[in-house]
Every structure is written in structure tokens, then in C-alpha cells.
Image (tube, rainbow, N blue to C red):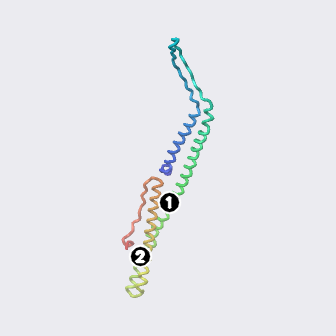
Amino acid sequence: EELQRTPELAVLAGERRIREAQVQLARTQARPDVSWQVGVRNSRDTRDTSLVAGFSLPLGSVRRADPEIRAAEAELALNSVERDARALQLYATLAEAHGRYLTSRLEVTRMARDVLPQLQRAENAAEKAWRAGAISYMEWAQLQAMRIDARQRQLEAAIAAQTALIELQRLTGQSMVAATDTVSTEDRR
């Protein structure tokens, strides 16, 4: 329903009204215009005054207007097809953007709830082991790099979710506010 009010479809609706008016105009031109005239004639030579009347009825105006009517009706039908095609295209874009949004939000949530806390615990344990001399600094640094990579993937997923949300808002013309997950200060290291 929100798609029906998008600017792209509103333009096509405006064009439809124009094409309907063109069909109406072509049909109006098919009706012959009967014209009539009434006048007074005064002859100075004979000093006569007479009443003169006349009318004209164009012949063949219906046949002459037929091609214009058919062309206007074809343009109107084409507008309906264009509108339906554009609506389907917009719906497909909307569905794709919605899918991207849901997938990206799920990735952000999964990283915040599962992956990052586990990597943080592993990094803390590795730091204790390194301080105790049980592992090398390189092993601890590898865990730090893994956590940084996971944060980077989470950030990229959040950006993708925001981009998809903007696309959804553009398509529907509605403001949508996404609830953001709060990230603890431990995850911001």
C-alpha cells in the first residue's frame, strides 16, 4: 500500500490523467460541430431588408477522428502497463532491500551477542596466559586481531543495515526508526 504513494508511481498517475484527457479530447473531436448563422441583409439598391439563416454540418469527422481516438486509447493502455511494470519493479526492490536489512541486522545482533563476547573472553584469557608466560605475545596479538576483525564485520553489517533501511524509507516514503542494539564499552576496545 505504501508503494502506491511513491513519487515514481505518482508521476505515472499524473501521466494517466493526461492521457485520459487526451482520449476524451479525441472523442469530443469525433462529434461534428454543427454551426449556424443568422443575420440581416440590407440591400440599398432595392431598399429591401431580409433575414438570412444558415447552418453547416461537417461530413466525415468521425472517420477522421478514429485514428486519433485509437492512438490516445493505446497510449492510455500503455500507461497502465508501464505503471504495473514499475510497481512490480518497486516491489521487487522493496523486498530485496527488506531482505538485506533483516540479514544485516541479524548479523549485527549475532556478532554483539555471540561472537564478540566469546572473542573478548578468549582475549582476556590469552592476556592472562601471556602474563603468566604460558603463550607467546604473537598468540595474544592474533586473538586481538580476530576481535578487531569481528568488530569490523559488525560495523560493515550495521552500515549495510542502515543503507537498506534508507532504501526502504525512500521506497515507501515513510520514516522508519530501527531499534539499535546497545554495545557495551568492553566491545568498543
Residue 139 disc label: none
Of circles 1 and 2, the one toward us is 1
Q: How many marks?
A: 2
Q: Amino acid at mark 1?
A: Ala
Which one is in front, 164 or 49? 49
In the image, residue 61 lies at what x, y percent?
Answer: 60, 33
Q: Quadrant of residue 148?
A: bottom left
In the image, residue 34 lies at what x, y percent?
Answer: 57, 27
Which one is in front, 91 or 179? 91
The residue labelled by disc 1 is: 97
Label 1: element kind: helix
Q: Is residue 189 left or right of residue 83?
A: left
In the image, residue 51 lies at what x, y percent?
Answer: 53, 16
Which one is in front, 80 or 124? 80
Q: Is residue 174 above or below residue 19?
A: below
The residue labelled by disc 2 is: 120
Point out the image quarter for the C terminus.
Answer: bottom left
How far, Cα to Cα, is label 1 from label 2?
A: 32 Å
Label 2: element kind: helix
In the image, residue 92 lies at what x, y percent?
Answer: 54, 57
Residue sitting at x 58%, y 30%:
32
